[in-house]
């Protein structure tokens, strides 16, 4: 039954993305990259949906090419970037501000100070955006900095084995296309936003006597993000946002996390990062020996385990105890 639910959720997500192409909110090219289908398959699915009376016919117009043109809709493309800086003045150690901005409006949407740019920090920022606004179509990662230097198993780039990283796997599960730095125009926008923050935020932190990451994060969320968005944001060319809603049943940190498969030992334990985790009876089962399970190391510090064969995004989580 749970496998059927999982398949239905996947099909619903696929049909939802294809329907956005019918409504003119997403291009066929973008949908094909997100779903890893050919454009011909996308057009075939469009015809099936139209036969069911869904979508509207979109009149084709010639694409107007213009340099430095922002995306037309809010939620169409999101920037994610880390900015290392002496945020608390030259007398204090530098730290990194991880910032997410919308391309169409230029508005900062969420930010987080960390000692350095890391995967969990990126997941925290994205979770804030996704919970408040929804899922974007595209995520643009600035690999001109830390992202580019992590090609051997780093946060976002492909590893030598060409296996997707945890970041790429999470974005694929959510149906978000990831673009690595390739556009000087787009990179310039996020760098200008970082420069704006370095000028204005540093001064405000100093004025309020803020010298710790915890205090800075509180001020950032309480005041600075909203005031900067209001002052420097611009209207999108199309007033209709294209954020995709997040299901109320989805715990984002069960996707925005590190996942690993393990086989349960005869004593109902699994080993994860040199730590033995004890699994207790649950879901009417007295033991899980030899079962395939999925370990999820979440940004909030929790470690959860789900049965690999019946896993779905809204499945129950087994209780763990660290020995």
Image: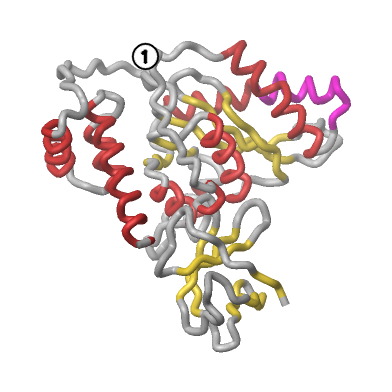
Q: Name the magenta segment's main secondary structure.
A: helix
The image position of residue 232, as x and y in percent, is 58, 13
Front residue of 230/155: it is 230
Compared to 139, does 287 lie above or below? Answer: below
| Residue drawn 38% across the image and 22% down it | 71
Report the coloring of the rendering: secondary structure
Q: Residue furthest front?
A: 284
Disc 1 element: loop
184 on left or right of 48? right
| Mark 1 crowd level (few <14, some 14–19, many ≥20, 10 Å Cα) | few
Pointer 1 residue: 238
Q: Quadrant of residue 319?
A: bottom right
Compared to 194, does 246 lie above or below? Answer: below
The image position of residue 230, as x and y in percent, is 60, 13
| Residue drawn 57% across the image and 72% down it | 282
169 on left or right of 213? left
| Residue drawn 40% across the image and 50% down it | 173
Q: Residue furthest bottom?
A: 266
The image position of residue 68, as x and y in percent, is 39, 19
Instruction: Check the picture and name the quadrant holding the N terminus.
Output: bottom left
In the image, the segment drawn in magenta is 197-210
In the rendered image, residue 319 lying in the magenta stretch gets the answer no
Front residue of 79/83: it is 79
Q: Quadrant of residue 268?
A: bottom right
């Amino acid at each position: 039954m749970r496998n059927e639910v999982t398949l239905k959720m996947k099909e619903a997500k696929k049909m939802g993305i294809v329907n956005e192409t019918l409504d003119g909110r997403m291009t066929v090219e973008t949908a094909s990259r997100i779903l890893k289908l050919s454009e011909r398959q996308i057009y075939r699915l469009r015809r099936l949906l139209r036969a069911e009376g869904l979508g509207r016919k979109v009149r084709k117009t010639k694409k107007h090419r213009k340099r430095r043109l922002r995306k037309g809709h809010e939620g169409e493309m999101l920037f994610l970037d880390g900015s290392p800086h002496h945020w608390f003045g030259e007398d204090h150690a530098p730290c990194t501000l991880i910032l997410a901005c919308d391309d169409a409006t230029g508005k900062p949407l969420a930010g987080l100070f960390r000692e350095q740019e890391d995967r969990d920090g990126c997941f925290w920022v994205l979770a804030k955006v996704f919970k408040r606004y929804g899922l974007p179509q595209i995520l643009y990662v600035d690999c001109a900095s830390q992202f580019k230097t992590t090609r051997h198993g780093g946060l976002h780039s492909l590893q030598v084995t060409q296996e997707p990283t945890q970041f790429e796997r999470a974005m694929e599960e959510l149906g978000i296309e990831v673009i690595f730095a390739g556009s000087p125009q787009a990179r310039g926008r996020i760098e200008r936003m970082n420069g704006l923050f370095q000028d204005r935020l540093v001064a405000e932190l100093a004025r309020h006597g803020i010298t710790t990451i915890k205090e800075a994060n509180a001020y950032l969320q309480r005041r600075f993000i909203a005031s900067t968005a209001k002052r420097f944001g611009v209207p999108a060319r199309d007033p209709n946002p294209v954020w995709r809603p997040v299901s109320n049943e989805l715990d984002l940190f069960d996707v925005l996390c590190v996942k690993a498969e393990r086989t349960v030992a005869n004593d109902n334990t699994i080993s994860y990062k040199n730590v033995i985790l004890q699994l207790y009876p649950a879901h009417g089962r007295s033991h899980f020996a030899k079962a395939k399970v999925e370990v999820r190391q979440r940004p909030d510090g929790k470690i959860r385990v789900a049965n690999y064969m019946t896993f779905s995004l809204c499945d129950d989580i087994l209780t763990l105890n660290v020995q």
